[in-house]
Amino acid sequence: MDCTGLCEALYRGGMDQGLAQFLSIFAGVLFVSGVPLVTVIFLIWVERKVAARIQDRIGPNRVGPFGLLQTFADLIKLLLKEDITPTSADRLLYNLAPLVSFASVILIWAVIPYTPYHYGADLEIGVLYFVAVASLGTLAIMTAGWASNNKYALLGAFRVVALLVSYEIPLVFSLLIPVMLAGSMSLLDIVFAQSGMWFVFLSPLAAVLFFISSQAETGRAPFDLIEAESELVAGFNIEYSGMKFGMFFAAEFLHVFTNAVLITILFFGGWLGLLWNEPIIAFLWLGIKSALFYFVSLWIRNTVPRLRIDQVMNFNWFFLVPLSIILLLVTSGVVMIFKTVGLVPLDAAGNMQLAGANLFDMLPLTLALLAVNALMIAPILNRWRNIGREARLANERRQQARMASPAVGD
Amino acid sequence: MTVLNEWAFIGVFAIMAPIFPALPILIAAILRPKKPNILKSQTYECGVETVGDTWVQFRVQYYLYGLVFLVFDVEMVFLFPWAMAYSQLDLFAFGAGFLFIFLLADALIYAWRKEVLAWR
Amino acid sequence: MEFEFNVVTVAFFVFSFITLAGGYAVVTAKNLFRGTIWLMMSLFGVSGLYLTLSAPFLAAVQILVYIGAIAILFTFAVMLTRSLTNLRDLYVRPQINLVGAVLLFVLIVVGVILPLFAANPQPPVSDEVIRTVDLGVALASGNGFVIPFEVASLLLTAAMIGAIVIARDTDDLV
């Protein structure tokens, strides 16, 4: 193992090399995980404020300036709540599930590059890593639902897990497109490959698909079947109370923000922006872009009504999955044609090389892919407009009929 | 050897990851009141006493979703390396990938036709 | 063979322990769901073993496919089987089990472990570092493994169609 940076400093200072290595890794872990852990405390406040504004309320404003300390008050409240474990629960798995649920989200941050120079681990298989780690969360939900030994919890867990596994298919298909364009699964390489053009311009549909399916993966509205209060009381976490419930809750908050960061990195150039060579500015760019997507997902959560389970599932299997498959086929076809003709940035060996390409070299491929995406979106939008129009006309006809005929005892 | 360094980081991270949520739970375990009684620790089903076994037989539909998902997941295992190497490959690889995805799309179409994917 | 004590060795022992402990818990679990969870623990250990062999792609695939998909499939399947989640002493026949276990152990020793020692103790290991990209090139280029690649797809398609035919509800088809 190589020993640089902090490790080197400690080693020079007379520490044992193994210990120095461990300490430097440990410090790295604390730094990398500290960012999301601190952010999530702040984000809970942001979420409540935004939700309040959308619902024409003020939101938390009593605890601390602008209610900023509200989260800490909630934390103390949760710490002091009695933790009830139902007697019929499977205690071991019941206690294990919230830990796994939170760990599955925080583990994603190990591969997220904050700046070109600051990242936890630059894995060769970064994209696959975060998909794999996130799938631990699905198992945690299943375990929580089963171990609670509650009918609502189990039914809620089953529905949610069916939803999560279904939406993982368009999620992964849309992930294949940045991987294909960048020629790498490392998140760092994917960001560098966007130096000429952000991938959202190369494949806006993939970005939309990723956004929708990652929104579903968090179990937020309009996909919040996890806590369909009116049907399932609270879903899989019904029997959880106190801090264990708090951990499921924190995991969900963190997951929403994690998804905002991931879509920024995969499609919106990550830290790329003006003066991104400066680490602080790079970090700010990532933060600003992620905050934007975080806001959009809050916006959707607070304005769109919950869908029924059959609507959610059919939307996925009959629309998102086929669309993502077709998108992958079409995109790979266009990329290959342009590569064969030679209209993409190539390296010395004749391979497609987007990293370090300038805007001008990227233009032909971008325009072609944009056109293809537009061709795919147009009929969909047209179809949706027609559906809306038909529904409106039918509604109007019904109203006219009601106006025309006198009310018969209703 | 740098590859190992990255994974050592992941390893330490993976050990730390469950500790982050475990800490507040442990602190809460010290601070919180502990007064369980029989009524409190019953299964909560809207105030009505729970009837029968929770772990009952579920519909086959869930299993089918799980199965289709598994098939797609295994497909991903092949498609990720394919997508990664795509920038180095030629038209032949496009054909190979196209055929690969097309065959699976076939299975999906079959599932549609048999109406197993529509939620009932 | 010189025994080197380093991080990889420690990791190997930790992951082996997880794998074996998980495996033991699976066979002793009386509850099918718990058995599934222990199986996943065991397979998680296997994915760690892949890591110590510098095969991160396989490790990620192991977690993605087994813990992400097969665990879910298992739990759905467990819930399909009525009243099997609490297996009482239904299948406990100590004598037969013992005979079976011993026979299997002998078979493994004779068939797998002894040949390993008998063969060249230094297994042929290439110095070449194979990256995941190389796997992709091998899968999809003309002189590579393109036929197995397509056959895999065909196999998956056949598996999915077969499972649908078997598992589909036939009674309430509209």
Image (spheres, helix red, strand yellow):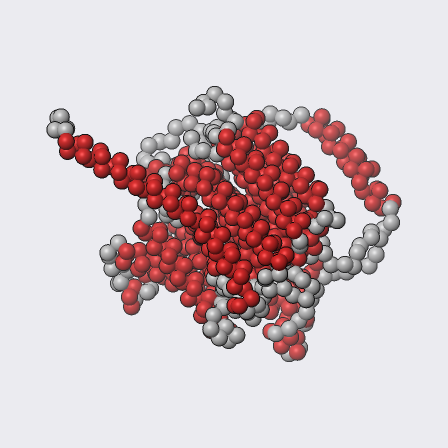
Residue furthest to the front in view is: A341
**For residue A232, side relative to residue C64 (left or right):** left
**For residue A368, side relative to residue C146 (left or right):** left
Whole-percent x, y for residue C8 in the image = 70, 58
Whole-percent x, y for residue B93 in the image = 66, 49
Res. A191 visible in picture: no
Residue B24 quadrant:
bottom left
Residue in the foreground of this view, choosing between A55 and C42: A55
Which residue is at 30% across, 60% downward? A49
Whole-percent x, y for residue A226 in the image = 40, 43
Res. A201 visible in picture: yes
Whole-percent x, y for residue C101 in the image = 73, 32
Residue in the foreground of this view, choosing between B120 and A371: A371
Which residue is at 46% across, 48% downward? A376
The C terminus of chain A lies in quadrant: top left
Residue C90 quadrant:
top right
Which residue is at 49% across, 43% downward? A321
| Vertical relation: A109 (above or below) B80 | below
The N terminus of chain A lies in quadrant: bottom right
Q: How many labels sit on residues?
A: 0
| Vertical relation: A377 (above or below) A269 | above
Residue in the foreground of this view, choosing between A219 and B31: A219
Which residue is at 71% across, 26% downward? C95
